[in-house]
Image (spheres, rainbow, N blue to C red):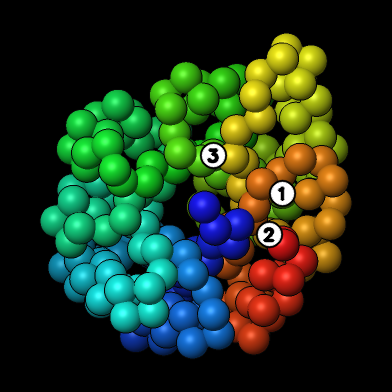
Amino acid sequence: MEKLQYISQGFTIEDQELNIRKALDNGIQWIQVRWKNAPENEFIKLCETSKKLCSKYQAVCIINDHVHIAKEIDAHGVHIGLQDMPVEAARFILGEDKLIGGTANTFQDVLQRMAESCDYIGLGPLRFTQTKEKLSPVLGLGGYQNIIEELKEKSFEIPKIFAIGGVVLNDIELLQQIGIYGVAVSGQITGKPTIISQFKTALQ
């Protein structure tokens, strides 16, 4: 599984598509299509375009929240929030071979996601981020460390956890030392797509 995921950004379909294209042009291999409050027909169109682009670049394309759209366009999977469809229901709709990621904010959330057999867990936010409305409590590096240590203390196998929420390149080394598997990045890659190669190097 890739260790770097780009979460798409943009207020219009044109912005979204342009940012996804730039990320792919600069070597991203995993896109999460996320566009909150979008008109449904435009979101479906963006998902269809993104899937085609990802196929062309041999990149993974997952859809945020919308399980039925992911099924319709045959995306590689979905990422679902804590208030969204249960993982079991998403798995039933999409089938066993699709990727399902789940959001978590606390140790209990992580245990829930592990019990639900998510393929990976998006744990965050690391710090305050403007890309998300109704932001969960900020974890900071200490929050990640506490969760990983608690998993170890209780002898759980550490799942594939992605840090999410305001993650920047300088965080990678410390996150990896803590035991975080990968990162999902939005703002820094949107602002400077050429930074992708540095993220990939740091995550090796």
The mark nearer the N terminus, 2 or 1, is 1
Q: Disc 1 and disc 3: Cα gap in Å?
A: 14 Å
Residue 177: in sight, yes or no?
Answer: yes
Is 16 or 137 nearer to us in this picture? 16
Lateral position of residue 16 relative to residue 70, left or right: right
Instruction: Name the residue rendered at 72%, 61% in the picture.
Output: 203
Lateral position of residue 87 relative to residue 112, left or right: left
State which mark lies toward you, 2 or 3.
3
Instruction: Name the residue rendered at 75%, 30% in the picture.
Output: 148
Q: Which residue is mark 1?
A: 126
Q: Position of residue 6 (x, y in %)?
A: 52, 66
Q: Which mark is residue 166?
A: 2
Task: Identify which amino acid the numbered label 2 is placed on.
Answer: Gly
Q: Disc 2 and disc 3: Cα gap in Å?
A: 16 Å
Q: Position of residue 99 (x, y in %)?
A: 37, 46
The mark nearer the N terminus, 2 or 3, is 3
- Name the image quarter holding residue 195: bottom right
Lateral position of residue 177 relative to residue 181, left or right: right
Q: Position of residue 128 (x, y in %)?
A: 70, 54
Residue 17 vertical placement versus 117 (above, below): below
Local packing at callout 2 (Cα closer than 10 Å; few below 14, some 14-19, many 20+) is: many
What SS does tag 1 mark?
loop
Is there a contact, CB below 8 Å, between mark 2 and mark 1?
yes
Residue 143: in sight, yes or no?
Answer: no
What SS does tag 3 mark?
strand
Q: Which mark is residue 121?
A: 3
Instruction: Name the residue rendered at 79%, 15% in the picture.
Output: 153
